Image (cartoon, rainbow, N blue to C red):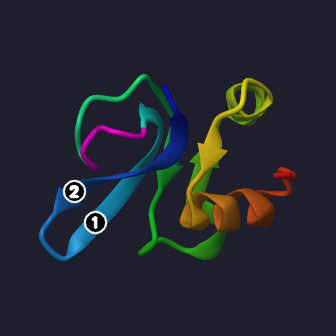
Amino acid sequence: MSVKIRLTRMGTKKRPYYRVVVVDSRKKRDGAFIENLGVYHPLEKEEDETKLNEERIRDWLSKGARPSHTVKVLLNKKGIQVK
């Protein structure tokens, strides 16, 4: 089973926010997830844009979870190194 760290869409029409979740790669975008790791609000001010549980993210990365491209960009902005 391949595990990914990716975004799932929440919110209303034209006011989205996203959860950063750990999910089986075969599941749908908004399907069942294993763990919620944080939120990403693209419409907020830059300093309020992301709230991430860095400890759990590092734990999942060490277990071999692969972040999506967008999540990798968010992690690099927060200073979390992704190999």
Say whether residue 59 is left or right of residue 2.
Answer: right
Q: Amino acid at mark 1?
A: Pro
Mark carried by residue 56: none
Residue 51: image location, x then y, percent: 60, 47
Main secondary-structure element of the magenta-colored stretch: loop
Query: Please, is residue 3 above or below residue 30 in the view?
Result: above
Q: Is residue 72 visible?
A: yes
- Is label 1 in a helix, a strand or a loop? strand
In the image, which residues are magenta?
25-29
Residue 75: image location, x then y, percent: 72, 56
Q: Amino acid at mark 2?
A: Gly
Say whether residue 58 is left or right of residue 41.
Answer: right
Query: Please, is residue 43 above or below residue 55 in the view?
Result: below
- Residue that carries the numbered disc 2 in the rendered image: 11
In this view of the protein, which residue sits in the foreground, 51 or 26?
A: 26
Residue 17: image location, x then y, percent: 35, 60
Residue 80: image location, x then y, percent: 83, 50
In this view of the protein, which residue sits in the foreground, 14 or 48?
A: 14
For label 2, the crowd category at 10 Å Cα-Cα, with few meaning under 14, some 14 to 19 and many 20 or more, is: few
Residue lying at 77% horizontally and 27% vertically, measured from the top left: 55
Contact, mark 2 vs mark 1 (Cβ under 8 Å): yes
For label 1, the crowd category at 10 Å Cα-Cα, with few meaning under 14, some 14 to 19 and many 20 or more, is: few
Q: Is residue 49 visible?
A: no
Residue lying at 38% horizontally and 55% vertically, measured from the top left: 18
Is residue 60 located in the magenta-colored stretch of the structure? no
Q: Residue furthest front?
A: 1
Q: Please identify the quarter of the rendering in which residue 49 is found.
A: bottom right
Residue lying at 86% horizontally and 51% vertically, measured from the top left: 83
Mark carried by residue 16: 1
Query: Please, is residue 46 above or below residue 53 in the view?
Result: below
Q: Please identify the quarter of the rendering in which residue 59 is found.
A: top right
